[in-house]
Image: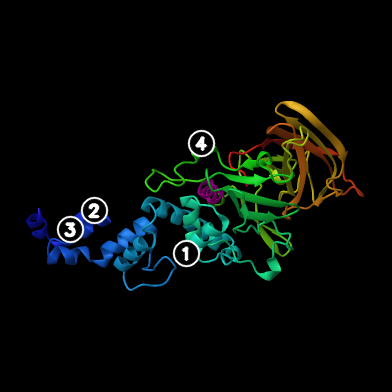
Amino acid sequence: MEKELDGLGYLPLRIILSKLSPSDIIKVSCANKRLRGSASDDSLWAQICYQELQLSTPQDDHGNPLPCFMLAYQLWREAFSMYPWPLVKRVKRCWDKLKKWFNNNFPEAEATLRRGASESDIEQLQTLLKVKLPLPTRLLYRFHDGQELPDKMNPKTASSSWLGIIGFSSRSKCIIVASSFASSRKLFFLNCTNGQLFVSTRKPLTDNEMIPCVPNTLIRSVHDLYGEEQQDAMLLWLEEHGRRLENGIIKVRKEGDDRSINLFPEVPPLCVTTVTNGVQVRASAVFVPEFSDLLDEAEKFVFAYSIRMSLLPEGCVINGMTFGSCQLNRRHWIIRADEEVVSSVDDEAVIGKFPLLHPGEGEFVYQSCSPLPSPSGSVEGHFTFVPGRLADPRGGPFKVQVARFPLEMPDYVF
């Protein structure tokens, strides 16, 4: 076999080596001087680094530049030798996807990511808190140790909902791994024993008052170095978040001078869109665990819904006549838990406002909440508008439909 390989030209030998695993390439390189030279070809290791680690330039796991790809691969393997290599590659892909999206859409958030924690940092933390981190979570912290928020964005004083943090705090067998501060504080706890991620509710923190964030059936081998497809809830949760961002299901919104990730879905079937007489209404909802109370039958599951209304560029069109504006007067909602009507609303305005719409202007956005006794329901209804203005109507009132949209407890809770 050695003689057959030794007799091949450069290109056939290069093709054969590119089909081998890195460990087999190392073995082949020990055969003779020519094979060792071919196996040291940096273009070969550039291909390996890109395929396994998505590296387009030679660098170590801290981003420091290196002289060649062969050395880069060697240092990466040494840095993570205590972890299953397939899991290392998966965690890196997870972070790479998130950072790519942040770089393109939300660079100010990417700038807050901290460098990875060292093995000694993690060991000290585990000793201090008397916990053993699941392997996937441990690896996630090796790549990035949470966020470094500027003082002006301190979560204790900030109201922006995007300011989630990843940090450590002890609570029995759980640690706090994320937190958000909007109108109410929301905490995420990782159970270090079984690898499940929980989110707090409105009540004081007890095991019965926390909601799992990921289906239990997906969690496996969280402490097994030799298991297959190790995955805890933290890794699955971040991967799902990355998928939603990448697919445009959730997007960045701008409110005043602040930008944040908006958790309200932007695409069907979770987001519905209807157009009536030129008025477009988009609607979607999210589950709000921090407002929910699992022991209160009436407010067991609380959902927030977002309504976005705008007048299309062609204006308000009624019976062939075009108007340059229209104004909302009333709203009518039918809210269901499962298929049973639990609330019917017919009243003036929305959040005390009578939005006046003009063609091509940005959306008027408002949000409201609805508690349900069950984890599944829906909202539908209509708004009543008048062409022109309420103070100077140019015609009779007309209804703008809002298609039925779901209130659903999701598989992944954020």
- Residue 288 drawn at (x, y percent): 70, 44
Asked if residue 92 can be seen in this view, the reply is yes
Q: Is residue 109 left or right of residue 43?
A: right
Camera-nearest residue between 9 and 332: 9
From the viewer's perspective, is the residue at label 3 or at label 2 nearer? 3
Q: Residue at x 64, y 46 (%)?
A: 199
What mark, if any, has residue 28 been given in the picture? 3
Of callouts 4 and 2, the N-terminal one: 2
Here the colouring is rainbow
- Residue 260 drawn at (x, y percent): 66, 58
Residue 321 in the magenta stretch? The answer is no
Of callouts 1 and 2, the N-terminal one: 2
Task: Farthest residue to the top: give it.
Answer: 340
From the viewer's perspective, is the residue at label 4 or at label 1 nearer? 1
Mark 4 vs mark 2, CA separation in Å: 35 Å
Q: Is residue 242 above or below residue 56?
A: above
Identify the residue under disc 1.
120
Asked if residue 288 can be seen in this view, the reply is no
Residue 240 in the magenta stretch? The answer is yes
- Residue 22 drawn at (x, y percent): 27, 57
Q: Which residues are magenta?
A: 233-244
Check disc 3: other Cα within 10 Å, few if <14, some if 14-19, many if 20+.
some
The kind of residue tagged 2 is Leu
Dominant secondary structure of the residues highlighted in magenta in the image? helix
Q: Secondary structure at mark 2?
A: loop
